[in-house]
Amino acid sequence: MQGAFNWRVAHLLGIQQLRHRFARSRLGQTWLTLSTALTIAAMGGVWSLLWKQPLRELLPFVGVGIIMWSFITQVLTECTLIFITHGHFYRNQKMNFSVSVYSVIYNNTLVLAYNLIIVVVLIIAFGVPINWYQLQIVPAFVLTWITMAWSGYIIAMACVRYRDIIQLITSWLQVLFWVTPVMWKPDFIPAQYHFIIDYNPFAQFLNLLRNPFLGEPVSSHTWLSTSAITFGGGILALLLIGRYQRRIIFWI
Amino acid sequence: MARISLRQVVVDFPVINAASQSLQLRLYQALGGKLTSSHRTVVVRALDGLDLNLNDGDRLGIIGHNGSGKTTLLRVLAGVYPPSAGEALIEGSVSSFADMTLGMDPESTGWDNIIFRCAFMGLSFATAKKLAPVIGEFSELGDYLTLPTRTYSTGMFLRLAFAISSSIEPNILIMDEMIGAGDAQFVQKAKRRLHELIGKANILAIASHDMTLIRDLCNKVIWLEHGVIKQFGPPKTIIAAYRNANPPRDLDKAEDDGCASVES
């Protein structure tokens, strides 16, 4: 947590990644928006044909879903390697390990900001209602950021100690993509299987981030479960971090 | 005011290999599987029960063979390695010259890198901007500063790194070998700056194979061997004892890893 005082370094490390990725490219960061837009258009189009659903209903849902899903999973995936990539900083200078995690979250929030242009286009093009529900975006992001901070730290710590977890997480996230309603709507599956949504934290956080943008309420089940994860998990994580953070440097 | 106090400091490095790093093995272990001793984590004790007290004005030289624990001790002093046992108390701002390029980015211009490096050293962006012109001038890089640093030669890059790293005055200065950067003329200038910095620091800790340097700079010397203090005392006595035990050979020169001493 003390890493927050070192926000300048987190900021620099965060934008550095963006800068490197698009260094000397003509379109630069616009590539982010362009490639996401293409994916959504292609997937949304095919999907609406497959499920025989009207495009105007499915595309905003799938579009916002893909953007939020990649925000969540990208943070977790990058955290698996972050202590290893930033290892030389920690070996040469006293720095709190959370700085790396913050830089990942910051970097991906910036990427998300670029992708929000697509969300705005979807909202306008498909006449998504604008209402008070959009205000839920603020608490939704606060909960998500907090959860990302502790879970990212735990993942980074576990991965630097047991390198197999890197592969484990990457493959799990791919599986989770299919059992989480990113590309399909919950009502596509029979009610007796809804437990894969109700008890799936990824589905709950996806609801939390997606519904407000679509002008829909976030269910109380989602609010409760995500808050419980955020704060309950956060306390557990702080205990774990407090216990093991002194050893991380020797694992790098 | 600066103070360093180490009490019975131990630093253990777990030697993590594929076996101990694998989750599968851990799971077997948790499930009651038997592990042969070769699978257990091997621990290397880099420092073993070190006591050390440094106060304002102390200039500590650290000598010893490669692998005797010099760099580990410096990293404990820099706060990088928390001791596995014992206590390390470090009061005062620390600046380590272990990696002068930390935080610098080859894709960005020299001017930007000045800001980046300063932020890594803990300065605010406003202070960094204020310092930038002075740093730029010291580096003697002129208009090159507007170019991405990837276009620099190694010597130029190090000159910039040195100019930035030496621009803030820490309470505790930590160095692994003496540093020099750039051509002969710049080396002289860098040396002067470094001596200024050392003069202003409350505490200096330097590890080196160069006995003349240690004798000139330090008032206390630690002779490390296998992670324990073999001898501690004033430079003259310790260096003489060290020389006695290790008569200078030509080979000693080659053994020195000569850390950050790069000249172009």
Image (cartoon, rainbow, N blue to C red):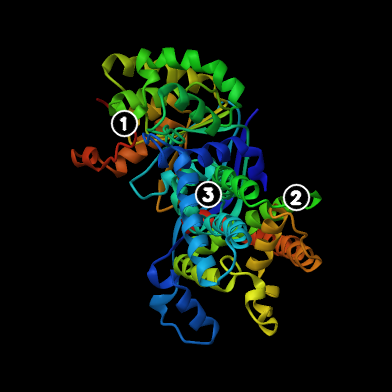
Disc 3 to disc 1: CB gap under 8 Å: no
Task: Residue B93 in the image: state x and y as whole percent.
Answer: 60, 32
Q: Which residue is mark 2?
A: A134
Task: Residue A165 in the image: state x and y as whole percent.
Answer: 48, 68
Compared across the picture, whether A126 is left or right of A12 comes to right
Above or below, B26 relative to B62: below
Tell which of A136 and B180 is nearer to you: A136
User: Label 1 lies in what chain?
Assistant: B
Q: Which residue is mark 3?
A: B81
Q: Residue at x 70, y 81 (%)?
A: A191
State the CA–CA distance, disc 3 to disc 2. 47 Å
Q: Residue at x 36, y 22 (%)?
A: B147
Q: Which residue is mark 1?
A: B261
State the CA–CA distance, disc 3 to disc 1. 24 Å
Above or below, B61 relative to A110: above
Callout 2: helix, strand or loop?
Answer: helix
Q: What's the residue type where badge 3 is placed?
A: Tyr
Place residue B239 in its image quadrant.
top left
User: Label 3 lies in what chain?
Assistant: B
Tell which of A193 and A62 is nearer to you: A62
Compared across the picture, whether B65 is left or right of B200 comes to left
